[in-house]
Image (tube, rainbow, N blue to C red):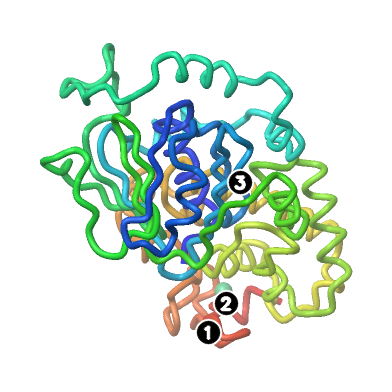
Amino acid sequence: VPEGHSVHRIARQFSTNFVGRRVAVSSPQGRFDQGASLLDGHVLADSRAIGKHLFLQFDDERFLHVHLGMYGAWDFAGEISTDATMLSANGRMGQTNQRGTFLDAQAPSIDDAALAGASRAAVPADVSPGGVPGASLGAPRRARIRMAENEAVSAAPAEFPPEPVGAVRVRLLTGTAVADLRGATTVEVLDGGQVQAVLDRLGPDPLIDKPKAGERRFVRRASAIARPIGLVLMDQEVVSGIGNVYRAEILFRQRLDPHTPAKQVSEEKLGKIWRDWSKLLRLGVETGQMMTRDRLSPAKYAQAMANRDDRHWVYHRTGLPCRVSRTPIVMEMMADRKLYWCPSCQT
Ligand SMILES: [Zn+2]
């Protein structure tokens, strides 16, 4: 299941290579014909991830809302970004991403400037094989990339646009890039009010909320709940974007027993959890990997980036010795999801 960092990276792919362009929207599979026809021919004005939710805002104030669920994936092809550094450099990291700004279509913003330029250029120009003038490492290049829980880059299709393959629920096509969505649990067209209703139900996201405000909101929500902290961290109404891997790893990093009732976790500790999630999420967006170990030597770091099993403290390590205490890591089911933890370190 894609966790928050994956969805933020997908949002950045759209920001970098689709925002500001007129988009042909279709449903090759046919199940989203009506929604697609509402968006077809409009300019994509903004792309934003909040937790595991993606919102693509079009120039007519309609939004495409996507939640990938367990099996969803985006396939991008054409002039696209395949390099993690590029995605982070051209993304909106560090910009003030207030919920209000996101929905306030009247406020002048960078997007409006891009939009004005895009309307004048009015797209379908042919893809230039050489790519962007002055292209440097990481600039968009002709390729194909599948973005879901993991990312897989492959050679560009011979033709552009490629024929849709299989059950493509939604296709977004510009003159230079195409995005095909398959298998998502939520695909819908919303207006601003409906988007706000979704946002109102979501806990804070470290890349959207201001650090202190996000932390306060998380601490306030979590400290009111009697359920175990191991469940609460995956409750998207309490905090956005944490899934099974980050849940296990954050609890280990904080040496916290997953069964501790959330309301018994000190506010200081909850604050640390929030700040740790903020750090891990940023790292995940930058690298495309759920790297949760730190203080690794350069060689160990490279090894961990190449091999998932070396990236984590406890996740997927049932029966293996804890990297700190040598105690065998335990796996148990918590609300139907596998939870990994160390009974010696996490008390
Ligand atoms: Zn241990």
Q: CA distance from mark 2 to mark 3?
A: 21 Å
x and y percentages locating residue 247 in the rendered image? 60, 67
Q: Secondary structure at mark 3?
A: helix
Q: Residues under labels 1 and 2: Cα distance? A: 5 Å
Of pointers 1 and 3, the one earlier in the residue sequence: 3
Which label is found at residue 341?
2
Label 3: how many residues lie within 10 Å, few (<14), some (14-19) or many (20+)? Answer: some
Q: Are marks 1 and 3 in contact (CB under 8 Å)?
A: no
> Considering the image in quadrants, where does the C terminus appear?
bottom right
Work out how far the residue at label 1 is from the one at label 3, CA to CA, in angstroms. 26 Å
**Who is closer to the viewer here, 235 or 173?**
173
- Mark 3 Cβ and ligand 1 under 8 Å apart: no
Q: Which residue is mark 3?
A: 279
Q: Residues within 10 Å of mark 2 (few under 14, many from 20)?
A: many
Residue for point 38% across, 49% down = 26
**Left or right placement of residue 18 versus residue 336 in this view:** left
Q: Are marks 2 and 3 in contact (CB under 8 Å)?
A: no
Relative height, residue 134 to residue 292 (above, below): above
Of the residues shown, which amino acid type is indicated by label 2? Trp
